[in-house]
Image (cartoon, rainbow, N blue to C red):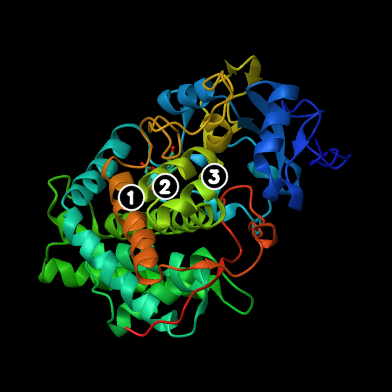
Amino acid sequence: MTDLTEPATGNGPPAGCPAHGGAMRLGGLEFQQSPSELYRAMRREYGPVAPILLDGDIPAWLVLGYAEVSYVTSHDDLFARDSRRWNQWPSIPADWPLMPFVGYQPSVLFTEGAEHQRRAGVITQALEGVDQFELAHWSSRIAHQLIDAFAGSGRAELMGSYAHALPMRAAVQMCGMPAGGDDTEELVRDLRITLDAHEGDDPVAAYVRVQERIQQLVKDKRSAPGPDVTSRMLVHSAQLSDEEIVQDLISIIAAAQQPTANWICNTLRLLLTDDRFALNVSGGRLSVGQALNEVLWLDTPTQNFIGRWAVRDTQLGGRQIRAGDCVVLGLAAANTDPQIWPEGHIGAENSAHLSFSNGEHRCPYPAPLLADVIARTAVETLLERLPDVVLGVEPEELTWRPSIWMRGLTALPVRFTPVVR
Ligand code: HEM
């Protein structure tokens, strides 16, 4: 096993910190290429809860065990979501790279207890109102439009021109902004910049424009409601304020976009590189549904989720956790925990994985179903339109994005016989 970590150096966490000494600094390209090896090694060395160092050597715990992740997520009285509890804030610079994920915002993501139930209840009901057939229809239309743009050329880079664009457009449509409008296009562009800034982009300015556009959407839907998520949130008996709805709409779109995009892309990669599935594309054994499910077990989009913060001193997996410690949910590691796969066989038909997390803050109930509709439609439409699609590079040339949080490819180049619709 390659040594995938760097030793913690003298400018690490202060003495007395629970993660001091022997903590693993996550990072390095090899980590992204084969994280499952790292999780296996960490489990061997540390057990189900590992001391880790995040960017800038900020200490935290990575929970690797299925039982332990389930325990943390189902005890929100002990492991809570409000990041202001963190005992490391004095060491964290304002421009810390993980700030967008841990910096407190007044959205559903960081609320707790009765307030969380109120906010999440509104989201759940608003998402429950989405007609899955209609969503499949929109997703298919968006998929066809995106494929039209490259179908005649015989080659495409599916990550940028398909997998990322599709769920974003589907989510915006669910919220009541029909695809194709100038406003929608601008919003989609700005959301892409806020979630995945490229060189030369200004994510802060883009975020301000996203907020303004969603504020306008909320205003429009107050005066002219429609059959969409935004309007259902506005009329909900919990009577959320417009500001709360704006925050939660942004959370819904952001929460939908990246993981669904990576779910689509990781599934396409599996279908295009694994013979068990490749056979099926031309009438073989394993289905797109099985590929989607296998990805959730073995290559899940949200590998690690930050996180929970300990409410008081406690024990977890034999570790002493201090009040205010940050606990990262190792969802990918938990899914491949040998404790739940004693035979070493991973990737069952069932859906008992933790890819959508668990407990009070899990991905809210209808969202996984909606994500499944979007992802399944995206994959099936692509295979129908481009039946002879193959990878445009050797499988081993595909590279994973340098992130310990999201598992997704940097690019998915493909070739196919050019088709005109
Ligand atoms: C239509 C697509 C989706 C929507 C609308 C959606 C929505 C949401 C929302 C609103 C939350 C915040 C819940 C809260 O804090 O109470 C959330 C959390 C989450 N979602 Fe989703 N999501 C979608 C797709 C996905 C996909 C495809 C995955 C991964 C396969 C995923 C994994 C998660 C995880 C891991 C969390 C964090 C839960 C936690 O804190 O324990 N979601 N999602």
Question: How far across and down, in percent of the image, does residue 126 sit?
Answer: 20, 51
Is tag 2's residue or tag 3's residue first in the polypeptide sequence?
A: 2
Disc 3 vs disc 1: Cβ atoms closer than 8 Å? no
Q: Which of 234 and 267 lies nearest the eye of the viewer?
A: 267
Q: Residue at x 80, y 40 (%)?
A: 5
Disc 1 residue type (three-letter) = Asp
Q: Which mark is residue 372?
A: 1
**Residue type at the position of mark 3:** Asp
Helix, strand or loop status at disc 1: helix
Identify the residue position indicated by label 3 in the image.
299
- Which element type, helix, strand or loop, lies under badge 2? helix
Residues at discs 1 and 2 in contact (Cβ within 8 Å): yes
Residue 150 visible to an observer of this rendering:
yes
Which quadrant is the N terminus positioned in? top right
Query: Which residue has dot 2 on it?
Result: 292
Instruction: Say whether residue 316 is left or right of residue 130.
Output: right
> How many neighbours does mark 3 have within 10 angstroms: few (below 14), some (14-19), or many (20 or more)?
many
Q: Residue at coordinates 41% horizontally, 57% vertically from top-left?
A: 281
C-alpha span from label 2 to label 3: 10 Å
